[in-house]
Amino acid sequence: MKKILTLAMMMVVAISANAMSYSMAKNEALFLSDKMAYELNLTNAQYDAVYEINLDYLMSVNGRDDVFGVWWNRRNIDLKYVLNAWQYEKYMSLNYFYRPLSWKSGSWSFSIYSRYSNRNLFYKARPSVYVTYKGGNHRKSSGHSIDRKQNHFDSGRAIAHNSGSGKSHFGRRK
């Protein structure tokens, strides 16, 4: 029994070791979202939403099996909702945006750095939600859940609607 318990604990530790920290996810989401705002000509409202979506995705990745799993699919659905048709088409054609994360040689690899090697270069100021957003804000659509608000984009401006309890699947990382 002790061997089984020890093995189970080792597996939990190994899985946790692969999870991206909140700080790392926040920094990578900012860098990725900034480049998306620059190349896709995002409005400020779109930039805020893209940052939230990218942060949610990165915080949801707990290991290599999650890189292109459920949360990656959710990210693409959410981005399709936020971006207009030409922006989404361009997003999908740029692999460093569409597949921003991979697992190589036992660690995370961020595709965006193949295009933008200067990690100190930002084209825009931080999104307005950078300080306040902690993750877990999913919209209701196609069976997906939302925890706190839903963004509707109308002619490039976002309108927030409260619609939830504030609970989040990221509670352990806040």
Image: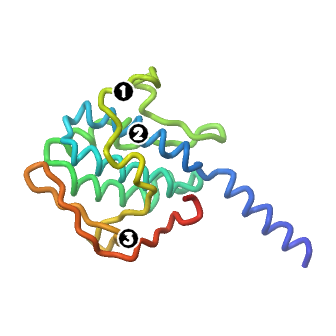
Tell me, for residue 122, which label it has, or none: 1
What residue is at 35 percent from the left and 65 percent from the top? 138
- Of residue 131 and residue 88, the one placed in the foreground of this image is 131
Q: Is residue 103 above or below residue 155?
A: above
154 vs 102, left or right, is: left
Give how far apart the Cα atoms at labels 2 and 1 are. 9 Å
Q: Amino acid at mark 1?
A: Phe
First along the sequence among labels 3 and 1: 1
134 vs 88, left or right, is: right
Q: Amino acid at mark 3?
A: Asp
What residue is at 55 percent from the left and 59 percent from the top? 174
Percent coordinates x, y for residue 118 in the rendering: 45, 20
Q: Residue furthest left?
A: 155
What residue is at 59 percent from the left and 53 percent from the top? 63
Helix, strand or loop at label 2? It is helix
Residue under circle 3?
147
- Of residue 84 and residue 168, the one placed in the foreground of this image is 168
Residue under circle 2?
30
Percent coordinates x, y for residue 9 in the rendering: 79, 66
Structural crowding at the residue carrying mark 2, measured as other residues with C-alpha within 10 Å and reported as few (<14), some (14–19) or many (≥20)? many
* Colouring rule applied to residues: rainbow
Percent coordinates x, y for residue 16 in the rendering: 67, 57
- Of residue 167 and residue 57, the one placed in the foreground of this image is 167
Give how far apart the Cα atoms at labels 3 and 1 are. 30 Å
